[in-house]
Image (spheres, rainbow, N blue to C red):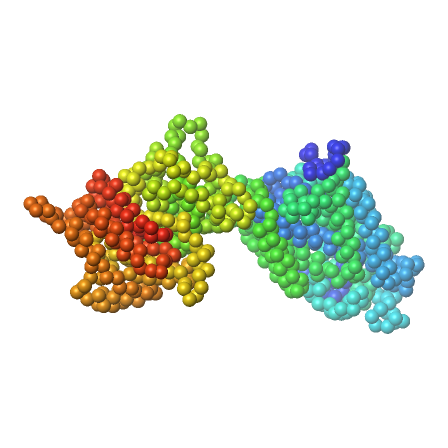
């Protein structure tokens, strides 16, 4: 047998004996399903609804619970079960949010069910012994709301004592009660045949205190049967409320809610996966046959007056009335105990799983034998509160709604497991399909709202609140989340449908691969690129310079959790892709080739700028960490010291840019982004909103400057995408048009304005004369005396092979020109020239980029290779 009482307190003691199928599942389920409805409300159901509607009610109710039983059996046979029954099944299948919220709902359902059975027992006692008299018998007990509450409290205390002793004594007590109930049932069946026709005087409290009427037991009569075939709804004599199909069904359905009584004992069963399916199905089939048989016998032998106005009439027509009275008491008391012990086991399982923290800490305590005594006491207290409702029919609708909601969720759990197609979902019980689960869910939801729209809506609202609370407050679990399996299943299906051959420029979106050496120095860059992605793919890439051949295991596995924790803390919608490589350049190539899946692959590479500035630890000051009082966690090393060597050379850095362009990836180089205080920029007053400066001209090659080439349009699109995000909508786009004297600047402006209009980009255009800057460029381009003229092909290149002729003086002048355009923006976008074909010029190329962007503040150099804008509808 398995150990019990985990999480309890005290010294180890003798453990409880595990229960077999019959005692642990069949007996509790039968007693819970019979109880009140069989002895006290079956006549009520048949009397109001008639035989046809009653049989329809049974068919609908048993169809719903039949579908649910199939789902319960499937989940119960898919692995080891522990304490908690339905809660354990749902929580391990759907995860802690659903499991915890449904666990609370199921706890409340069992609590209200226990109160309902206690109230039914009080009603039976008062009918037999109450003053004024109702029916025959000895009448000595005074009747009033407070007296009936006192009787209920005493009976509930008796249940508490049995449940405190433990599951073993409960099983023995229920077996004794089971024998009594079966004896009473046999007596009732015999009585229908053996009892002679008799009149039963009935007191009608809601008509007149002195008025009585005779109910008739006619024996088998075709006339009586015909009279009872159709429905005839009247006022319920216990509550004074008019009955209807839904209210009668709500009461009747309580006779079907006991199907989980055996499942609730899962922690006390010898073999739960074996016992629950066999025991539950057997009990359900038996009760269905008995209910239908008794409904027919009642309709054939009792008139409406008797059925509608004397809920204890079975005692009056019995060949041995005292035995029926004992049976009613025993069955309802057993059902009350069953629900009380079920509620305590659910509460104990919830407490042990720590989903609600300290709120349920007290319920973890167990006795030496493993009985969760504190959970039993807490459940008893809640049942005692429910007893204040006073009447059985008053809470029947609420109890039914709670149980239907739980059953719907059990079906949902099984449906989710089936649809997820997880290889480890292999229940040994195979008599179910996703159709049965779906039918069970639909049936439960429809009946919930038919019975009580208000209770159903309130229950769903309460369930939603619990879901949200657990989602945000509960600790993560190791049970596995069905949502992850379902998401995987759907994502795989849709990724296969995402055909790259059907891509169109109208639906282009940026898909970013941001290379991060150490997140401590890149927190704001990570956040900035998250704004740039525009609902596209975003991958954080990292290259670890190690050789797997020289290592005992993959070092990236240990780092993965740190990176994922970083993504969670920074609240960015990004994936993480780590790789091992002998050099950074090789690693970036690997990630560009392999990152993404199917039609979701990065089309844009983002790099930090290569300069001599020492990286700062921006992660320690990031609000995500300072507000949570975390030390900079996550196991990332401190930033590189200023004197420490870099992991890659300038030549290798430019080579990465060249590699990306050869692979037809757009490239973004971000400089000084760690100085971007987005929160401050976006808090600027409306009179001086933040601005984004856009320079769509190749400043290092003014002789080939065009505003409508692929790279310029990509630069415009990138700035526009940033401006479209919610955080940056207040920012103003400013587009700088560099003009020379005599070049018809206004015509160029009109042409650019028309282009922006066609592209639906709102931006302010500002003309910038740059004759002095261009003059410096041409001065550098003059051919020295006797020297060769530049080759035609070479001069047509985006960044010429004669890059050495672009002087530092010219680049500084271009930098000054950009810097002078005030006021200072939040971020600048500049045109990134293509690296030179001659790799020996890579250091000079990087030097020119450094001069161009020096002291500009947050700057993004952009080079686009793909068409990204469209003027079509």
Residue drawn at 51 percent across, 41 percent down: 633
Residue in the picture at 33% in, 43% down: 611
* Residue closer to the observer: 769 or 218: 769
Q: Position of residue 175 (x, y in %)?
A: 79, 43
Q: Residue furthest left?
A: 786
Residue 664 percent location from the top left of the image: 28, 48
**Residue 725 location (% of width, % of height):** 42, 59
In the rendered view, would you say 657 is above or below 441?
Answer: above
Q: Position of residue 9 (x, y in %)?
A: 73, 37
- Where is 690 relative to 430, above or below? below
Position of the N terminus, as image quadrant, is top right
Can residue 353 be seen in the rendering of this structure?
yes
Residue drawn 20% across and 61% down? Answer: 740
Classify residue 736 by image quadrant.
bottom left
Q: Is residue 557 left or right of residue 393?
A: left
Residue at the image point whose x is 30% and y is 61% from the top: 735
Q: Nearer the viewer, residue 90 or 658?
A: 658
The image quadrant that residue 142 belongs to is: bottom right
The count of marks equals 0
Q: Is residue 2 above or below residue 162?
A: above
Residue nearest the viewer, comparing 534 with 339: 534
Looking at the image, residue 191 sits to the left or right of residue 434; the answer is: right
Placement of 132 over or under 805, stated as above or below: below
Which quadrant: the C terminus?
bottom left
Question: Can residue 716 be seen here?
Answer: no
């Amino acid at each position: 047998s398995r150990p019990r009482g985990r999480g309890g307190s005290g010294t180890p003691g003798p453990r409880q004996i595990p229960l077999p199928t019959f005692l642990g599942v069949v007996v509790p389920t039968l007693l819970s399903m019979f109880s009140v409805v069989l002895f006290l409300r079956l006549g009520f159901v048949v009397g109001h609804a008639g035989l046809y509607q009653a049989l329809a009610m049974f068919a609908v109710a048993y169809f719903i619970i039949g579908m649910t039983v199939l789902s319960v059996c499937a989940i119960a046979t898919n692995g080891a079960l522990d304490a908690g029954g339905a809660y354990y099944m749902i929580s391990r299948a759907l995860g802690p949010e659903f499991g915890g919220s449904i666990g609370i709902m199921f706890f409340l359902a069992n609590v209200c069910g226990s109160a309902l059975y206690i109230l039914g027992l009080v009603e039976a006692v008062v009918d037999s012994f109450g003053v004024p008299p109702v029916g025959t018998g000895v009448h000595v007990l005074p009747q009033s709301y407070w007296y009936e509450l006192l009787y209920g409290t005493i009976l509930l205390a008796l249940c508490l004592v049995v449940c405190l002793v433990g599951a073993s004594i409960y099983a023995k007590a229920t077996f004794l009660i089971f024998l009594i109930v079966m004896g009473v049932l046999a007596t009732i069946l015999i009585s229908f045949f053996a009892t002679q026709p008799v009149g039963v005087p009935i007191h009608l409290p809601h008509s007149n205190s002195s008025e009585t009427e005779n109910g008739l037991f006619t024996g088998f009569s075709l006339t009586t049967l015909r009279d009872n075939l159709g429905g005839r709804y009247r006022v319920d004599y216990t509550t004074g409320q008019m009955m209807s199909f839904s209210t009668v069904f709500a009461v009747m359905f309580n006779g079907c809610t006991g199907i989980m009584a055996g499942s609730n004992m899962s922690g006390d069963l010898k073999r739960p996966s074996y016992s629950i399916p066999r025991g539950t199905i057997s009990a359900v089939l038996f009760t269905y046959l008995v209910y239908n048989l008794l409904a027919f016998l009642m309709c054939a032998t009792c008139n409406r007056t008797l059925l509608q106005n004397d809920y204890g009439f079975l005692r009056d027509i019995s060949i041995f009335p005292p035995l029926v009275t004992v049976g009613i008491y025993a069955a309802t008391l057993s059902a009350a105990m069953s629900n009380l012990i079920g509620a305590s086991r659910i509460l104990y399982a919830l407490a042990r799983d720590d989903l609600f923290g300290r709120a349920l800490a007290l319920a973890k305590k167990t006795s030496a034998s493993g009985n969760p005594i504190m959970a039993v006491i807490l459940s008893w207290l809640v049942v005692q509160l429910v007893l204040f409702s006073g009447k059985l029919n008053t809470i029947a609708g609420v109890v039914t709604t709670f149980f239907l909601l739980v059953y719907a969720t059990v079906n949902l759990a099984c449906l989710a497991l089936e649809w997820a197609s997880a290889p480890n979902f292999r229940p040994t019980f195979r008599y179910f399909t996703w159709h049965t689960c779906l039918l069970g869910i639909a049936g439960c939801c429809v009946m919930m709202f038919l019975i009580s729209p208000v209770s159903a809506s309130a229950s769903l609202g309460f369930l939603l609140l619990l879901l949200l609370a657990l989602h945000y407050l509960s600790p993560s679990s190791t049970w596995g989340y069905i949502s992850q399996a379902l998401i995987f299943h759907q994502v795989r299906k849709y990724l296969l449908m995402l055909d790259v051959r059907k891509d169109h420029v109208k639906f282009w979106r940026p898909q970013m691969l941001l290379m991060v050496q150490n997140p401590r120095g890149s927190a704001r860059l990570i956040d900035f690129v998250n704004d740039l992605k525009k609902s596209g793919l975003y991958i954080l890439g990292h290259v670890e310079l190690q050789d797997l051949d020289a290592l005992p295991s993959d070092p990236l596995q240990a780092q993965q959790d740190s990176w994922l924790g970083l993504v969670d803390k920074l609240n960015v919608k990004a994936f993480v892709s780590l790789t091992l490589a002998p050099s950074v350049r090789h690693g970036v190539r690997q990630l560009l080739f392999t990152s993404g899946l199917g039609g979701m692959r990065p089309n844009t590479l983002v790099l930090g700028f290569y300069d001599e500035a020492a990286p700062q630890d921006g992660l320690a000051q990031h609000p995500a960490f300072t507000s949570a009082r975390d030390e900079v966690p996550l196991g990332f090393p401190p930033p590189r010291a200023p004197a420490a060597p870099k992991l890659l050379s300038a030549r290798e850095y430019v080579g990465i840019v060249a590699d990306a362009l050869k692979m037809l990836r757009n490239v973004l180089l971000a400089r000084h982004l760690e100085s971007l205080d987005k929160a401050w920029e976006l808090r600027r007053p409306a009179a001086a909103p933040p601005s984004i400066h856009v320079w769509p001209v190749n400043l290092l090659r003014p002789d080939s400057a065009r505003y409508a080439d692929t790279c310029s349009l990509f630069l415009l699109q990138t700035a526009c995408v940033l401006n479209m995000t919610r955080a940056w909508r207040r920012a103003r786009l400013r587009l700088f048009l560099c003009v020379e004297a005599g070049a018809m600047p206004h015509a160029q402006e009109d042409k650019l304005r028309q282009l922006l209009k066609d592209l639906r980009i709102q931006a302010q255009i500002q003309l910038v004369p740059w004759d002095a800057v261009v003059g410096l460029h041409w001065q550098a381009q003059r051919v020295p005396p006797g020297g060769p003229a530049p080759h035609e092909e070479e001069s047509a290149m985006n960044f010429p092979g004669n890059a050495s002729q672009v002087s530092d003086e010219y680049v500084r002048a271009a930098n000054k020109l950009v810097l002078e355009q005030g006021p200072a923006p939040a971020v600048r976008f500049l045109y990134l020239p293509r690296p030179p074909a001659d790799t020996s010029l890579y250091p000079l190329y990087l030097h020119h980029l450094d001069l161009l962007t020096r002291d500009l503040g947050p700057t993004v150099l952009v080079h686009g290779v793909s068409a990204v804008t469209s003027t079509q509808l």
